[in-house]
Image (tube, rainbow, N blue to C red):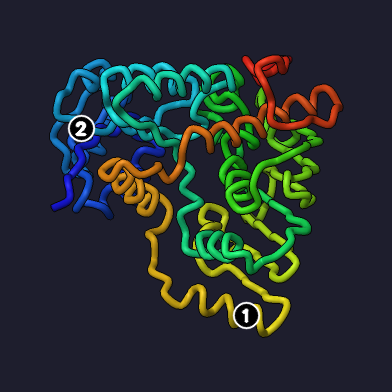
Amino acid sequence: MQKIMKVALVGLGIGQAHFERGYAQNRDIFEVVVLCDLNRQRLAECAERFGIARTTTSFEEVLAMEDIDVIDIVTPPMEHREMILKALERGKHVICEKPLVGSLADLDIVQAAEKRSSARLMPIYQYRFGDGVQKVKRIIEAGLAGKPYIATVETHWRREADYYAVDWRGKWATELGGVLMTHAIHQHDMLTFLMGPVARLFGRTATRVNAIEVEDCVSASLVMQNGALVTLSATLGCTEEISRVRLCFENVTFESNHEAYNPGQDPWRILPASPETGEKIAALLADWQPIGNRYIGQFRAFHVAVQSGAPLPVTTEDARRSLELVTAFYHSSHSGEDVELPLDPSHPRYGNWRLA
């Protein structure tokens, strides 16, 4: 019989989506038993809507609850580091929204704490968990796609003044970045999930759409370690919101659906270069079973990993790859330099990508 893990959900902004699109669909393996939020009205409304009796405005109270197995941190980014460290010290498993922390140096500290702890830490990158992107991953890993040539990733969304009326948004000290950090980070993670690590990056950032501190338009040219060339663009000023990933390989071209907030899910266009390749792909995917979209799939895979001792579906090393790209992006835009990855502790932005 599977263990039902008891969860404390901390932060009820995006945290509401974690419950409704994740835990509520996995009631056989998770039970959210406590809600935590500083906004008392939102806390009361969510408790009533979700049918959860136990609530608190104190994270320290959550840490002291002996029946909690997992603390799911969905608070503003500047709070993640300390909350993660405290939870791991108490032996609580942690799920945490992006960005995991505010610098590569902070990630070193968190990873060291993770190694000392009996608990495990999983960053949220839910766009990986869709049947479309997972099928593409299987095809690439099977060697059917062949040599990677080129890719494009577009995150063209829209955010206006009402979005930035929330006090912590749009500020370096609290949001830790703009469209690159808060919005495009998921599509960029999908890129490296499918095509591997970045070798070099030349990027540009600008604030053109909103009256905010952080960037809301970016573009970049990348060289991947496998030799493929990639272009990235993201904006918060697009009338039609889309997310689009297109990958051109020797034997297959892949293109995601264009749903802004669900690009990992089917349908993806899978265009083989020959009938023979198409037949091999059909055979490879013949036994496909749905994995559970977004939070459903990621949370279920987390449960399996924790209970079995298997590797986590998303790790802090995945978060490092994501945050290295962000760090290199900001450095390149400020310096005008082409940046080589991976970055080591001697890099000037290793401890703070937000340097002026």
Q: Is residue 145 above or below residue 347?
A: below
Q: Nearer the viewer, residue 62 or 192?
A: 192
Residue at x 22%, y 32% (from the top left corner): 69
- SS state under label 2: strand
Image coordinates for residue 195, horizontal then vertical, percent? 65, 51
- Name the outermost residue toward the right: 336
Which amino acid lies under the numbered mark 2 shown in the image of this protein?
Val
Instruction: Answer yes or no: is residue 211 visible.
Output: no
Q: Is residue 55 above or below residue 229?
A: above
Instruction: Answer yes or no: is residue 36 visible.
Output: yes
Label 1 crowd (10 A; few <14 / some 14-19 / many >=20): some
Label 2 crowd (10 A; few <14 / some 14-19 / many >=20): many
Name the mark nearer the viewer: 1 or 2: 1
Image coordinates for residue 316, horizontal then vertical, percent? 48, 32
Residue at x 19%, y 37% (from the top left corner): 6
Residue at x 57%, y 17% (from the top left corner): 105
State which quadrant residue 277 falls in: bottom right
| Residue 34 image label | 2
Residue at x 72%, y 71% (from the top left corner): 251
What's the distance in space between the residues labelled 1 and 2, CA to CA?
49 Å
* 100 lies left or right of 74: right
Image coordinates for residue 44, horizontal then vertical, percent? 22, 32
Image coordinates for residue 194, horizontal then vertical, percent? 61, 53
Q: Is residue 327 above or below residue 351?
A: below
Q: Nearer the viewer, residue 283 or 303?
A: 283
| Residue 242 image label | none
* 138 lies left or right of 216: left
- SS state under label 1: helix
Circle 1 sits on which residue?
A: 278
Which amino acid lies under the numbered mark 1 shown in the image of this protein?
Gly
Closer to the chain start, of discs 1 and 2, is 2
* 221 lies left or right of 189: right
